Amino acid sequence: MSNPPLILNKNLVVLARVLERLENSAVAVDAEQYRSVVNHLASELAASPHDAGLETVLRACPSVALVFENLHYHQEGLCRSPADAAINALLQARDAIALARLT
């Protein structure tokens, strides 16, 4: 039994690459350009089926996965964040609050 071919949304892939380049740029990025890329990316993510192609893009592009997670937070919470990192952040915040209360 063969696997079905992986279908990728070309616009999504191009926008994902652009966002990754902006995120990793050593040069300051124009805020309006960044917003425009993220807005177009959000539209493509909304139009894309949640399939193997989308999962491939999300795994390959952490910045896109973060945008996807933020767009779906109201439905799924932090669905793509590793639980260990989230728990550690929660514990650090709790410790910082406790320390602040002591001072």
Image (cartoon, rainbow, N blue to C red):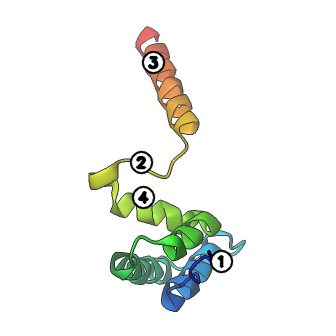
Judging by the rendered image, the residue that carries numbered circle 1 is: 21
Of residues 15 and 58, the one nearer the viewer is: 58
Quarter of the image where the N terminus is located: bottom right
Q: Nearer the N terminus, badge 1 or badge 3?
A: 1
Q: Seen in the image, is 100 located left or right of residue 17?
A: left
Of residues 12 and 37, the one nearer the viewer is: 12
Q: Which of the two discs, 1 and 2, sits closer to the camera? A: 2
**Badge 3, how many Cα within 10 Å: few under 14, some, many 20+?**
few
Of residues 58 and 19, the one nearer the viewer is: 58
Judging by the rendered image, the residue that carries numbered circle 2 is: 78
* Figure quadrant of residue 27: bottom right
Q: Which of the two discs, 4 and 3, sits closer to the camera? A: 4
Q: Position of residue 86 (x, y in %)?
A: 51, 37
Secondary structure state at the residue bearing disc 4: helix
Discs 3, 2 touching: Cβ within 8 Å: no
Above or below — where is 69 with respect to 12? above
Q: Nearer the N terminus, badge 1 or badge 2?
A: 1
Residue at the image position 56 percent from the left and 83 percent from the top: 13
Q: Which of the two discs, 1 and 3, sits closer to the camera? A: 1
Q: Which mark is residue 69?
A: 4
Q: Which mark is residue 86?
A: none
The residue lying furthest to the top in this view is: 102
Judging by the rendered image, the residue that carries numbered circle 3 is: 100
Q: Position of residue 96 (x, y in %)?
A: 50, 22
